[in-house]
Image (spheres, rainbow, N blue to C red):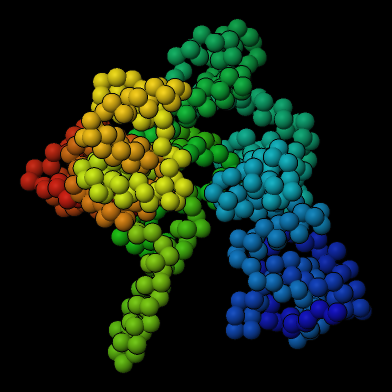
Amino acid sequence: MLNPTIAVGKINPGRNPRKYFDPAEIAELTDSVRENGVIQPILIRPLGDDCYELVAGERRLRAAKEAHGDYYEIPVTIREMSEEEADRLALIENVQRADMAPSEEAVAAARIVGQLKGDRDEAARVLGWSRSTLDKRLALMNCSEAVLDALNTRALQLGHAELLATLAKDKQDKLLPVIIAEKKTIAELKKTIEAAACSLVTAIFDKADCAACPHNSSLQTEMFGEAIATGNCTNRACYSQKTDKQLETVAYGLKDEYPVIRIVRAGDNHTRVQLVVDGPTGVGEEQAKACHACENFGAAVSALPDSMGKVYRGQCFDTACNTKKVAARLKAERDTKAAKQAPAKAEASTQAASKGTTKATAEEKPVTQISESEKVKAYRTAMWRKALRREAAADADTANTYLLAMALTGLSRHIAGETMGKIFEKLVDEKSSATDLKKNLSAVHDLDAGKRQNLTMALTVAAIEGVDVSHLVALCQYHKLDLRQHWNLQKSKDFLEMLTKSEMKVLADELGLRAALGDNFAKVFNKSKPELIEALLNVEGFDYSGKVPKVLCF
């Protein structure tokens, strides 16, 4: 079966990670295409309006265009795919064909790690690389643009670039022309960099112990006639260990403020983006508030040479989601502008947009809501059980109805003997037996009718305690359990303690605490977490009753 063909002019060069093409090899390929045409199909994806984007096969596309022009019908394989899938296939195809510069592999691999939210193990699996190979490639992302370009054009060897990647970018750019002009070997460069050692002036850790350390170049100058410049450390392993410890300390200090804190290293360039409200990269004011409670929102601690130890707050670690939110905001603004400019079409457009919005809202979570962490899920499940047990136990008919319904559904197996034993002991002030049925028969027979009825109701309580979450939710919904009667923020300090300060901002918006605090909002949130919690629990004039966060509802 023959592959379909598409005119070269309809195909846009896309996301090829390969930036350097050997001129001699391209000329040779062009001659072959001029004589024999393109035999192996290129891979493209449709963009709409009879246009396509190249995913793999740029050398063949270039040669075909040079040999036959834009109207040449080139054989293609057309495949629907997302931008993320196209990025991965483009890199994998080039890696499999070899001769791709390591720097080009590094840039493309960094994009894929970003798409996978920083999961390097998954990225290595997708690329078919070992984790070690991936880490080595990503380390090249600390090279300056000039060094990467030199590696692309084969003016440098991989070993040169790997050594330069350990330096700040300005130092790389100073060394680069010297390396090329003097044709320095990798061994010579290594010797130069070892001589440069590690600067104690820019170290972010406490240098008190360094004063008397024999690896401190200041002491070496006093002891030896020849030594490197003062203020440097010649023990890179120790220097790196202390730096990493300090980075972890900085990250730990942010744990009360954000849902996620990450130490950003070379190669993590595409795993985060600054959350912006307005402008071409802004998500909009309301969405920005909601993002504060997202499990992918937080702070980055830099482990890069040029910004070592610096904290970047307000980071989004789901770059794909951020891109969608920005696009949605820009589209909404364009639609609004278009509606104003075309009043006649405004009503129809509004109706269509309303239908689309309704569908999107049904598919997505409410924008302003605390993220459902495992701690929050466990907290709310315990609250549901306690509230439902309390209400079911207050009415015999209700308790019996629920008990029979659960038994018919096969859920009576969730009634734990241990739980019933505790209830029995509390009710009659004597212990039941976990193994002796005759003893329990006698004990229950001796109970008066009232206590026996209470014990029967206790079966419902025990069953509610044991059922899984899905059945618990069904019970709560049927019962129309009103959580407002069982939960109040002022009595739920433990709930606030499991949230970060960032998540508390979302809670303040949702419950109306931001408006109640008014101009004091920023001042309150600048306090330590314990002080902030006390402030939120004691807002003067605020009515706490009847306000339950969405994340706690079933």
Q: Nearer the viewer, residue 349 or 240?
A: 349
Q: Measuring 60% from the left and 60% from the top, which residue is drawn there?
A: 84
Q: Is residue 431 left or right of residue 229?
A: left
Q: How many marks?
A: 0
Q: Is residue 284 left or right of residue 162?
A: left
Q: Measuring 14% from the left and 47% from the top, which residue is drawn there?
A: 545
Rendered location of residue 455, percent (x, y): 29, 34
Rendered location of residue 489, percent (x, y): 20, 42
**Residue most toward the bottom?**
344
Q: Is residue 54 above or below residue 169?
A: below
Q: Nearer the viewer, residue 133 or 500?
A: 500
Q: Is residue 554 above or below residue 30?
A: above
Q: Measuring 44% from the left and 39% from the top, which residue is drawn there?
A: 414
Q: Is residue 335 above or below residue 428?
A: below
Q: Nearer the viewer, residue 350 or 362?
A: 362
Quarter of the N terminus within the rendering: bottom right
Q: Measuring 71% from the left and 57% from the top, which residue is drawn there?
A: 91
Give the quadrant of residue 364: bottom left
Residue 157 shows up from this direction = yes
Q: Is residue 166 left or right of residue 479?
A: right
Rendered location of residue 117, percent (x, y): 54, 49
Rendered location of residue 234, percent (x, y): 61, 19
Q: Nearer the viewer, residue 400 or 216?
A: 400
Residue 386 shows up from this direction = no
